[in-house]
Image: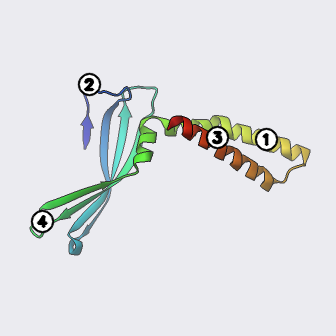
Amino acid sequence: VTRSKKNVKEETTIIISRRTYTCHGYTHEPKKQLAYFILGEHNERSMKILPAFDFHGMIFCYYDSNGIVSTVDVQYDQMGFYMNYFGLSAMHLWCMRCVVTPFAMLWMNVYNKTGKVHPLTFLVQVLVTLTIFSYVVFQVVM
């Protein structure tokens, strides 16, 4: 199933131009009058600077004794969706790959050559630094 937004004016500056849905799993429980499945969603952007992203949600369909759907419950990770939507996940991945990891590798090599720090101590220092960095970024974003 594909849903496209063409000639639709969006109020946001970050536009999803095309969504493609796929069903990844389906389970039917007749005793509970419940059918549920995992819905995969691929979102393509109209702004080329933001990457396309995939997302998954659980869809629960409850039905009555006549087989008519009475309730539909959709559950997904909203924080994860919006982090992908605004490109924050991609920025985090880039930052880890291009900034934090090279810095940590350089730091580790310096400490290994000097022989003054145990690898476990180095790991604790990196984790403390990442925790502080993540806290500061979270405060700026939120």
Give the spatial CA distance, label 1 vs label 3.
16 Å
Label number found at residue 9: 2
Q: Earlier in the sequence, mark 4 or mark 3?
A: 4
Q: Foreground: 131 or 74?
A: 131
Residue behind mark 1: 107
Q: Amino acid at mark 2?
A: Lys
Question: Do labels 4 and 3 touch, CB within 8 Å?
Answer: no
Instruction: Look at the numbered disc 3 and give the secondary structure of its residue.
Output: helix
Give the spatial CA distance, label 2 vs label 3.
37 Å
Label 4 CA crowd tier, 10 Å (few <14, some 14–19, many 20+): few
Give the spatial CA distance, label 1 vs label 2.
49 Å
Q: Nearer the viewer, mark 2 or mark 3?
A: 3
Label 1 CA crowd tier, 10 Å (few <14, some 14–19, many 20+): few
Q: Earlier in the sequence, mark 1 or mark 2?
A: 2
Q: Amino acid at mark 1?
A: Trp
Percent of width and height locating residue 131: 65, 47
Give the spatial CA distance, label 4 vs label 2.
39 Å
Q: Residue at x 44, y 35 (%)?
A: 86
Q: Residue at x 84, y 54 (%)?
A: 118
Answer left or right for 93 relative to 47: right
Instruction: Look at the numbered disc 4 and give the secondary structure of its residue.
Output: loop
Q: Amino acid at mark 4?
A: Gly
Q: Foreground: 75 or 37?
A: 75
Q: Amino acid at mark 3?
A: Phe
Q: Nearer the viewer, mark 4 or mark 2?
A: 2
Label number found at residue 67: 4
Write down the quadrant of residue 12 in the picture.
top left
Write down the quadrant of residue 70 in the picture.
bottom left
